[in-house]
Structures are given as C-alpha cells and as structure tokens.
Amino acid sequence: MKFNYKHDGLDGLVLIDEYYFNELNGDILYSFDIFIDSKGITELIYDFPDEKWEVVRARESIVFKDFCNSGKMIVLLANKSVENCEIDFIDGECDADMFLNVPSGKLVLVNASELIQCISYPELEMEKILEINVEKGTYAVKNEGIKKISCYKNASKKSVFNNFLEL
C-alpha cells in the first residue's frame, strides 16, 4: 500500500493496532510527548528546570519505550515529510529488531502528534494516514526509514525489541 507521510514540526509515524488505543493512558502519552521532543525545544523543558534535556528525555521516556517494546506500537521519528512511501505485508519469515502485535487486525498508521492529541481528547476525530485490515497476529517489521516498511507475518522472535527509531 502506498501513502505519503506529512507533518509539521516534531513528529513521527506510528504503527499500532487500534485495540491498544485504550491502553494509552496519561503517563504513556506524557512519556511519548517527551520522547518526540528529541532536542528539548518544546514547553516540556519547563517541567524540568535545571536538568539537561538528554537526561530528562532518557529517564522520562522509559514508560513510552516499554509500551513500544512490548510489541504494541512502533514509532519512527522523522524531521521531514516523505512522499511515495510503501507498506507491504509478506507471508514469510524475517529476522528483525521490531515486532508488532496486531490482536484485532486493524492496523493504523498515524502521526504521533495526532495520536497523542486524539487519545488525550477523545471528542476529536483522528486523522489517520492509513487504516489497514490485516491478519491478526505478530509481525516482524523491517524498514528503510519511512519510505519502505515491510511486515512479515511469520515472525521469528528475539528477546530484545527496539520498536522506536529516530531517523
């Protein structure tokens, strides 16, 4: 499937099964917000006076990273929009560091900022980049940045996950 990734400012592409939306509580969203601000340029820095942002970000984004690394979400942070992107689903095996659980079969691609805002304010309608019905299960995910994402159905699992990437 083809898509374009467009955003303003600090953001990232999120892959998540909509089943997990209800697990995104205030602690995870705050931690996610801090993770997105890789350079400490938002108002979040005022919550941590007299601390180096790198230290704050590493400490305060642990909740978010744990959520991602449990296989519930993949985040690809990007500083620029990317056109002519592609996501493919392959029935085969692959050795990858990223894994995604898709328990409902409703995979959503959305901007990180949009996800945070719409989960925080449920009355807002989420503008999704893609919503894809796929076979339920666990997928190994390989990527070439945001440009090309490949999801392999028969995932060989590793014990260490890294479901977030700064591009």
Image (cartoon, rainbow, N blue to C red):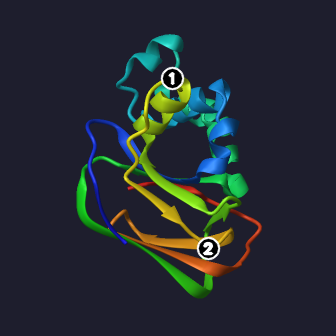
The span from disc 1 to disc 2 (Cα, nearest Å) is 31 Å
- Residue corresponding to mark 1: 121
Q: Position of residue 150 (x, y in %)?
A: 48, 75
Do the residues under discs 1 and 2 have CB atoms within 8 angstroms? no
Circle 2: is it few (<14), some (14-19), or many (20+) Cα within 10 Å?
many
Asked if residue 104 is positioned above or below residue 159 in the image, the reply reads above
Q: Position of residue 39 (x, y in %)?
A: 38, 33
Residue 125 in percent (x, y) is at 43, 33
Q: Residues within 10 Å of mark 1 (few under 14, many from 20)?
A: few
| Residue 140, numbered label | 2
The answer to which of marks 1 and 2 sits earlier in the sequence is: 1
In the rendered structure, the answer to whether residue 61 lies left or right of residue 123 reads: right
The answer, for residue 135, to whether it is visible in the render is yes
Three-letter amino acid code of the residue under disc 1: Tyr
Q: How many marks?
A: 2
- Amino acid at the residue labelled 2: Ala
- For the point 26% across and 37% down, the residue is 8
